[in-house]
Image (cartoon, rainbow, N blue to C red):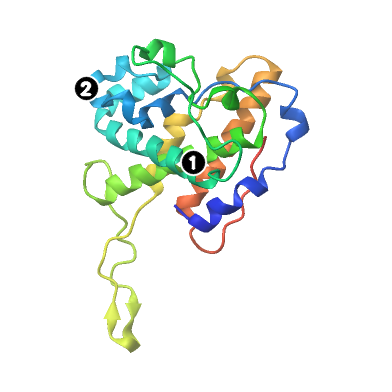
Amino acid sequence: MDRAALLALPSLCALWAAVLSLFPCGTQGNWMWLGIASFGVPEKLGCAGLPLNSRQKELCKRKPYLLPSIREGARLGIQECRSQFRHERWNCMVATTTATATASSLATSPLFGYELSSGTKETAFIYAVMAAGLVHSVTRSCSAGNMTECSCDTTLQNGGSPSEGWHWGGCSDDVQYGMWFSRKFLDFPISNTTGKESKVLLAMNLHNNEAGRQLPENIKPPLRLTLAF
């Protein structure tokens, strides 16, 4: 993921702050628990035993081979969050859980505690960086040939500079499948939400998810992001 763009994320969280501060955020980030090493190996627990919502569990059942990428995406997001906020008072510290915590209890417990249930720039950044981590991990898995549904991007092959006597024969990362899966896995349809306040909050979370997805895709030209919180 683009390091320079991530460095700019915290300073760009300036939109809709007054609106979101009036309402608590919904907790849709429970899948993030999969990125914690102490959680265990998701593949051994099965989709039904994971802290996912019903839509995510259904997608998991249809595509269980993506579990390692989902777990890696969560880990990358948490790691990047800690890196970006390492010198701040809040440094992406995860909520305290016990070894006996179950998937059902984690399903109602946001990974970062109150930050995911309050309207802050930290919340906006978390949603964006976790979405970016998921796109990145799925895309890398595609490029590595670990999945049959996707591969690498061959559109640049045979390109290059004839005058300099070279051509590109490699296989680039194709982010399109990663973007598609991230939207299917993370974005909850607004039409399925009731209540004006919930729709406003969900729209903001969806905006931040999409902002995060642009990080792996728009490496050049320089990326400008606007997050909502």
* Mark closer to the observer (2, 1): 1
- The residue nearer to you, when weighing 109 against 192, is 109
Q: Residues within 10 Å of mark 1 (few under 14, many from 20)?
A: some
Residue 155 position by quadrant: bottom left
N-term mark: 2 or 1: 2
* Residue sitting farthest toward the bottom: 163
Q: Quadrant of residue 75?
A: top left
179 with respect to 39 (left or right): right
Q: How many marks?
A: 2
Q: x, y (%) of residue 35?
A: 37, 32
Determine which of the numbered discs, if any, sits on residue 44 in the image: 2
Residue 6 x/y as whole percent: 54, 51
Q: Secondary structure at mark 1?
A: helix
Q: Quarter of the image containing the C terminus? A: top right
The correct choice, above or below, for 96 with respect to 124 in the image is above
* Residue name at image x 63 percent, y 30 percent: 203
Q: Position of residue 207 (x, y in %)?
A: 60, 37
Query: Along the horizontal axis of the image, is 123 left or right of 95?
Result: right
User: Three-letter amino acid code at disc 1?
Assistant: Arg
Which residue position is annotated with label 1?
82
Kind of residue at disc 2 = Lys
Q: Is residue 50 above or below residue 139?
A: above
Residue found 28% across the figure and 76% down from its top: 167
Say left or right for 13 vs 105: right
State which quadrant residue 208 falls in: top right
- Say the numbered circle drawn on residue 110: none
Q: Which residue does the image show at 28% across and 45% down from the upper left?
A: 141
Residue 113, position as x, y percentages in the image: 54, 23
Under circle 2, the secondary element is helix
| Badge 2: residue crowd in 10 Å (few <14, some 14–19, many ≥20) | few
Q: Are marks 2 and 1 in contact (CB under 8 Å)?
A: no
